[in-house]
Image: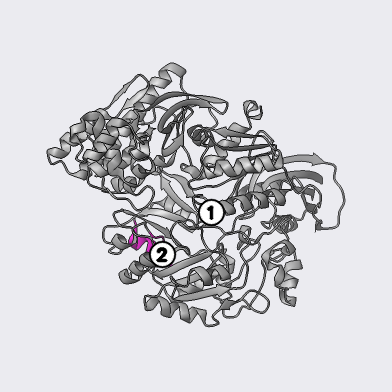
Amino acid sequence: MNGISIHLTGVVQGVGFRPWVWRTATALGLSGSVSNRFDGVRIELYGSDCRAFLEVLEREPPPLSRIDAVHAEEIPFRSMEGFRILESETAGDALQRIAPDTAPCDACRRELFDPSGRRYRHPFINCVDCGPRFSIIEGLPYDRSLTTMRTFDMCTACAKEYADPADRRYHAQPVACPECGPRIEPENWEMAWCEAMERGRIVAVKGIGGFHLACAAQNAEAVATLRRRKGRESKPFACMVPNLEWVKSICALSAAEERLLQSRERPIVLLKTKRTFPSLEFLAPGLDTLGIMLPYSPMHELMFDRYPHPVVMTSANHTAEPMIHTNAAAAERLAGIADRFILHNRAIANRCEDSVCAVHGGQTIVLRPGRGIAPLSMPEASGRTILAFGADMKNCPALAHHGQVTLLPYVGDLEHPEAQHILHSAVERELACFHVVPEQVVHDLHPDYFSTQIAERFAATHGIPSVGVQHHHAHLAGAHPGPAIGFAFDGTGYGTDGSIWGGEVLVYTTSGFERAFHLRPFALPGGEAAIRHPERVADALLHQLDPERIDNPATRVQLASGLNCPSTSSMGRLFDAVACLLGVCGDPTYDGEAAMRLEAVADGSECGDLAFGIRDGQIDWRPLVADLLDELAKGIPAGILAARFHNTLAEIVFCCGRLLTERHGRLPWVFAGGVFQNRLLVDRIKRVVDGAYELVFSSLPNDSGLALGQIRIGAEPWASR
């Protein structure tokens, strides 16, 4: 007989870990105890084969857990009666992680459709292995009294399950049944839903983290009506489909994409569609990809049981506004959009957009960390308490404390005042939950960003030092701390020289960087207006080649004078200009549309490329654009030239990386920034490099992951001065 003490850290609280330990230890005939502590979970085991427990833990951990570290040591044997779950420590709960919301587990899904069960067709069925977490939490420790379930008193049967460690609903805080749980209005909501879909109506549906607007995805008139009412001219809609068979009938699906679709996170996954799918043109105009998700709540399971066809599921809001999450706001602000409302009376404490992911070369990238994925916690080496506010586009703040960093769910673009309020509230709530005060505030270097201003006001109010971090340095440090050769390609980032960067090749560590190469600067006539009207950027490129090529005399004069023509090295703007010159997209209606259309039209079989130059630290795009225009004049199709443009960028990456490797030795090549959401470009880079160098592509390539890099850089000693 022997004993073993085990200390676990990670996502190990609020995910059914203690009852899992109780069941596993009991099945192995072990005695001992398990308890939640301020720094994780503590287990003591006594018996003849304690090591067998560690084998099971490694092989089959609790489904919602994520174990960061296991520390096990032998201890003297003690004779104990059975295995006990001890009361949690109440002091020092700072290391608890808030788990994300997850899809129904298989057991709950079976129970949902079992006519003999007392939760038959109960739209809020859950257990300790699934269901809402973050969306209902109001404070820590994670207990029912600190969630929005506190207003629902458990019936006798639910209370018995809740108190029984052998039951899978032991301490499942959202546990409820039709007798004691939340309710949906109208009472005949399933029939109302089915009827609305069949008649082409728009339905506002309250879900896990907020409201969706839904309509039948194959009804072109219904989708057009939703676009008109929501003010979403051509931006693609995500669709929820009944099952995997439906996905396979619409999209080309890899094994990795299939696993991601069916994961407990249930994100929206961007998938290549089949040419035979006729609805693509009005669901995702001009694109060859579609955002698809499977049902991720018991309510969705019931909806598709009644109406087994694809449905548009888009955030319930007017374009550019944050998602609505309260019944009152829905009634007030969706009255002119939705024809029907399906509501429930469980309050949403924390709104949470659907996560958006894609698979590039077998790697999952997260384009929007939301429901199911965020809050995203991971180890952080410095141990300091640092608050990072991210950037203005696709904002996600992050908090580091006690050796962990948590990326909070997607807030959105901060141009809207309500999004600014959400950011401030999310930060305050997170600090209150963990009972910490940051010792450092980190923000983007751009002085006019709303995130910068919010961060500086917060720091001044609380008497905390703040520091600005260069945008592209943060992108790269968030992907890999360095030392590394970094390619940061995006639309806009404030440079250390006060200009707009965006096509940057840096040699960096978290403590600093060298701007080794950058895209040759060009003007943005009209400043922000050039981002909305790519023909202005195209004219700026033409101006450097030959001003006489510019058709608009006013633009020619403006570029010659330099009046209101800020300089940029943005790779994102180069994409916009090329899309405009090729006639692919001259009038985008949403961020990234031109680049997405350029990728969609590119002929994947084309292997040719265009000319370019690298000299004096600049990547000269002029030969590329001249070559492009010459080929276009010869009648070469836009799809061929779009492919050659992507191929050329891959060659540019290879040349810059090889030159810097000769100077600095074999460092990893790291890729971050919104441009690397481009599946074709990533594929071409991997093909050109062909394994010759270590490539690291950020799993959070756009600005949603920026705060992670800000945390790492902000932890450096220079940032504290």
Position of residue 503 relative to residue 658, above or below, is: below
Question: Mark 1 highlights which residue?
Answer: 417
For the point 54% across and 63% down, the residue is: 210
For the point 38% across and 23% down, the residue is: 658
Residue 384 painted magenta: no
Position of residue 553 relative to residue 262, above or below, is: above
Disc nearer the start of the sequence (2/1): 2
Rounded to the nearest angstrom, the CA distance separating label 2 from label 1 is: 19 Å
- State the image coordinates of residue 590 (x, y, percent, origin top left): 37, 52
Q: How many marks?
A: 2
- State the image coordinates of residue 44 (x, y, percent, origin top left): 79, 48
Q: Is residue 606 visible?
A: no
Give the SS element for disc 2.
helix
Residue 464: mark in rendering: none
Instruction: State the image quarter where residue 461 is shown.
Output: top right
- State the image coordinates of residue 525 (x, y, percent, origin top left): 32, 38
In this picture, residue 145 sits left or right of residue 368: right
Q: Is residue 234 visible?
A: yes
Residue 230: mark in rendering: 2
